[in-house]
Amino acid sequence: MGKLSRVALLYIGAVVVSAVVLVARGPFAGLRWQYVVFLGILVIVSESRATQLRQGQLTWSSSSAAMLASVVLVGPVGAAIVGACTALGLRRGPSLLQRVFNTSMYALSAYLAGRVFLACGGHVGLPSEKSFPGIIAPFAAAAVIHVAANHGLLSGVLWLTRPRDRMSSGSPGAQGPGVGLSARLLLTDIGYAAYGLLMAALWSVVGFFAPLLVLIPLFVARWAVAQFVEQQKAYEATVGALCQAVETKDFYTRGHSDRVSRGSVMIAREVGMRGERVEAIRYAGMLHDVGKLGVPTKVLQKTGKLTEEEYAAIQLHPMRGLDIVREIGFLDEALAGIMHHHERIDGRGYPMGLAGDEIPEFARVLAVADAFDSMTSTRSYRGARPVAEAIEELRKWSGTQFDPAFVDAFVAALKREGWQRPEPPVLATDDLATVTAQDHDDPGAPLRVIDSL
Amino acid sequence: MSDLAGRTPAHSSREMRRYPWQIRDSGQLLLVVAAGVWMVAAVAQTAAKGLQDPRIAIAFGALIAFGEVLRLNLPGDRETAPIGFAGALAYALLINVGTQFVQHSAEQVVTVATIGMIIGALPHLAVGRPARLSGMAARLLCVACVAYIFRPLAGNSAVERHWGLAVTLMTALTVLALLLEAVLTALLRVDEQRARFRVALVDEMRVQLPLGAAVGASALLIAFAAEVMGLAALAVFTAPLLVTQVAFRRYAGIRATYLQTVRALAKVTEIGGYVEAGHSERVSRLAVAIGRELGIHEPQLLELEYAALMHDIGQLSLHDPIPGGATVLVSRQDQQRIAELGADVIRQAQVLGSVAEIVRRQNEPYRDTGHAANGRAGLAEPYQGSRPPLSSRIIKAANAFDDLVGSSLDPGRAAAAVQRLRLDTASEYDPATVEALSRVVTRRSVML
C-alpha cells in the first residue's frame, strides 16, 4: 500500500501492540472456548460477505452483532479473540498490513466494549429472564463504545494515510479520509450491535441456533440491497445504450444525450436540488431527444429552408418523445422536462408556447444544457464553438430563451468543473450514418422556415 | 410527410388485473373456496368457545394486519406479505409468552390470521387496489396447516421439556409452510399462465427462497423470543424483516422500471416508422407465451422478453426504413445485418450479453440445409453445434407470424400464417416452436 509516513506507522504499531498486550494479559481461566469458537466462525462468515464501500477503500460487514454478543457471553478477553477472527475473513483485497491493522482494531474495540460492559455492572454469561431489563444499560454503553472505538480508530488511520494512499479497512467508513463519520453507517452499526444482545438473550432458549436465526434476516436484507444495486447499474447501462442507439444514425449528434444529461446534472447540483431530483434530471437529459426519431430523415437532412409542414414535424419531437417514455413509471417530473425542453422564457418556444415560470423547472434546466452542447459540438455547417463563446451566447439569450438563474448556475458550475467537449466527428464512408443539416438545438443558427406570409 | 405510426396507446392487455369477483380460473376458485370454508368454520368455533389470551391474540392480529398493509410485489407479479405471514406463523408456533403458557387452539390461530388479513386488506381496497384473494387464501392455508399440526402438540409435556425437540419440530413446520406456499403459488401460476408445474415450482422457489428464509427465521425468532422478552419480541424481530422488505421493494421497483423502460424504448422503432405500430410488444408477448409453453424458466423468459422487445432495434441504424417494416420480406443478408446491428446496440449495455446473442442469431435457420451445395443433396442433416439458441428460434417464429398477421385478430388469417410457418419447418423454423406457437394462437382465438 505504498509508503506510509512515520506517524502512520507509529499509529498502526500502537494499535497492534495495545491489542496484543491487552489480550495476552488474560485472564483465560473460565473462558468458554466453545462459545468463542462458534462466535469467531460467525465473524469470519460475516467478514467474508463484507460489502465494498466507495471503490474498495472501505468495506463494511455485519460482524458487529456477533462481536457484541460475545461481549455478553464471554467477556472482554473472549470478545477480543472473537474480534481478532476478522483476520481469517476469506476476502481478497486487503494487504498484510491492512489485515493486521483491522484485526488489532477489532480486537481492541471488542475488548474496550467488554470492559465498559463490566464497569457498568453487566454480568458475563448467558442472560436469563431475570437479567432484563438490568442488562440493557450496560449493553448499550458497550455497543456505543464498540462502534465509537471502531470508527475512531479507523478515522485515525484514514486521516494519517490520507495524502498518499487510503487504507482499505474492515469497517464502516468516513465520508472521505479523515473527514468524519458517516452518520448512517454509524446508526446501522449500532442497530446491528443491538442484535448482539438479542443473540445472547436467545442463546439461553435455543442455544447455538440463536445466532443463525438472528443473522438470516440480516443477511437476506443485505443480499436484497446488493441485488438492487446491481440491477440499478444494469438499468443505467441499458438506458445509456438505448439512447445511444437512437442517436447513432447521426454522426454529429452522437453523445449529445449523454452530455446534455451531464450538463443538466451540473446545473441541478449547483442550484441544490435534492438527490432524487438530480437522478431524475439525469434520465431526463438522456431521454430528452428520443422523439427525434419521429422526424423523417429527409427533414433532418434538408439544407434549404424548411416548409411549414417540415417545421411542424420538428416541433412535434418533444411530444413524440413523451409518447415513448410516458409509460416509464418513475420518470414523473422528468416527463414534463422532456416535453417542454424547447419552450422559451419569452413564450415563443414549442410545443405549447409556455412562458416564464409556467415552464417546468426541469425543462428550463434541460434547455440550457441542450443548447450549450449543441453550440460546443461540431455541426455540418460550422465547427465546434469554444466554451467561452457558447457561454456568451447563453448569456445573450438569458431572459428571452433561457432562465437566467439556470444560465448563471451552469456558468458557475462550468468554471469549477470544466467541460469535456466532444471529439470532432470522424465521418465514415459507410452509408449508415446520416448528417443533420440544421440543428434544432442550436440557438446561434435557428431553423430557417419558409415564410408563409 | 409519411404517416408516422406508433400513436396508438400501448394496449395494456398483458395479464389484466382482475377483481376478486372476476375469478375465472378453476384452481383459484377452488383454493379461495377451500380457505373460505375453513375460515368460516374456524371463526364460528372460536366465537362459540371464546378467545383465549385476548391480549396476545390482539397483538398478533395487529402484526398480521400491519403486514398485510405492507404487501410487497416481487418480480413476476407475485404478491407477498412477509411480515403478516411471519406474524401468523409465529402465532401458530407460540408456546410461552414470558412465563405465561399459552394454549390457544388452532381454530383461534386461523381466526386471528383471517381477521388480521381482512383488516390489513381494507386500506388496499380503499385506494382501489384489488385484494388478491388467491394469495391471501394460500397464506391462510399454510398457516392453518401449521396450526392444526402444532397447536395440539404445544400443550404436550414432552415438547415442553425437550427444547431440542420443540426447536426441530418448529423449524420443520416452518419449512413445510414455506414449501406449501411455494407449491400452492406454483399451482396457481400453472392455472393462470399455462406454465408447466415443474418449471413454475422451480421458479417460485428461486424467487421466494431468500425472502422465505427471512420470513421463516423471523417467525421462529418471534416465537422463541416471546419467552424471554414477552410481546416486545414482536416489535424487535419485525424490525429486520421490515428492513428486508424495504430492500426487496426497491429491488422489485427497479426491476419493474427496467422492463417498462425497455418496453418504452423498444417503441422508438415504431415511432421512427421502421416497424408497424405495436409490433415489438406483440412479438414479445407471443414469444413469452411460446417460451412458457416450451417450459423455459423465468430468468431466461425475461431475457427472451427483452430480446423480443428489442429484436428490431438494429433497424434504427438503417438509412431508410424497410417498407412496412416487415423483416420477413427482405433478403437474408439484410435481415442478418439488422440482427447484427441490433446485437451491437444491446452489447453496448454490457449487462445484456445473452440478450445480444439471442438478437444476433434471430434470423438463423433452424437447420442449415446448405442448399445442396456441398453434396448433401438436400438431406436435412442438422448442424448440431451451430443450431441457434431456443430463444432465437422462438423470436424468429413469433416475428414471422406477426409480420404475416399483424394486429389482425382474424383466426383464419392466423391459421394460414401458422400453416405457412409449418411448411417451412424443414429448414427455417424449429418444428417444436411452431407447434407451441400454434397452440398459443389456437388458445387465443378460442378465448376471443
Image (cartoon, coloured by chain):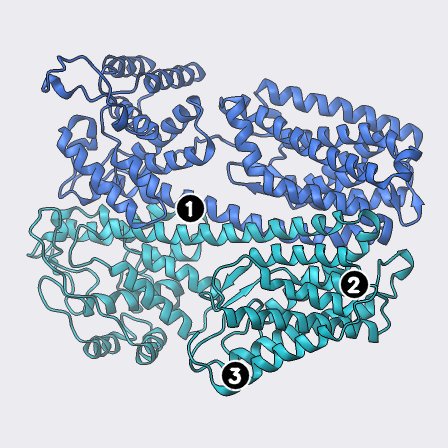
Chain colours: A cyan, B blue
Residue at image point 46% right, 33% down = B298
Quadrant for the N terminus of chain B in the image: top left
C-alpha gap between disc 3 and disc 1: 47 Å
Residues marked 2 and 3 touching at CB (< 8 Å): no
Residue identified by numbered label 2: A74
Q: Is residue A399 left or right of residue B191?
A: left
Residue identified by numbered label 1: B258
Pinpoint residue A371: horizontal percent, then vertical percent. 24, 67
Q: Secondary structure at mark 1?
A: helix
Please, which residue is most extreme toward the bottom here? A7
C-alpha gap between disc 1 and disc 2: 49 Å
Q: Nearer the viewer, residue B345 or A284?
A: B345
Identify whether A407 is placed above or below B430: below
Residues marked 1 and 2 touching at CB (< 8 Å): no
Pinpoint residue B210: horizontal percent, then vertical percent. 59, 43
- Label 2: few (<14), some (14–19) or many (≥20) C-alpha neighbours in 10 Å: many
Q: Is residue A193 left or right of residue B188?
A: right
For the question of whether residue B128 can be seen, the reply is no
Picture quadrant where residue B163 is located: top right
Q: Nearer the viewer, residue B28 or A48?
A: A48
Q: Numbered disc 2: what chain?
A: A
Picture quadrant where residue B386 is located: top left
Residue identified by numbered label 3: A8
Q: Nearer the viewer, mark 1 or mark 2?
A: 2
Residue at image point 33% right, 72% down = A403
Q: Please tell me which of labels 2 and 3 falls first in the chain.
A: 3
Pinpoint residue A405: horizontal percent, then vertical percent. 36, 76
Identify whether B310 is placed above or below A90: above
C-alpha gap between disc 2 and disc 3: 33 Å
Q: Nearer the viewer, residue B163 or B439?
A: B163
Quadrant for the C terminus of chain B in the image: top left
Q: Secondary structure at mark 2?
A: helix
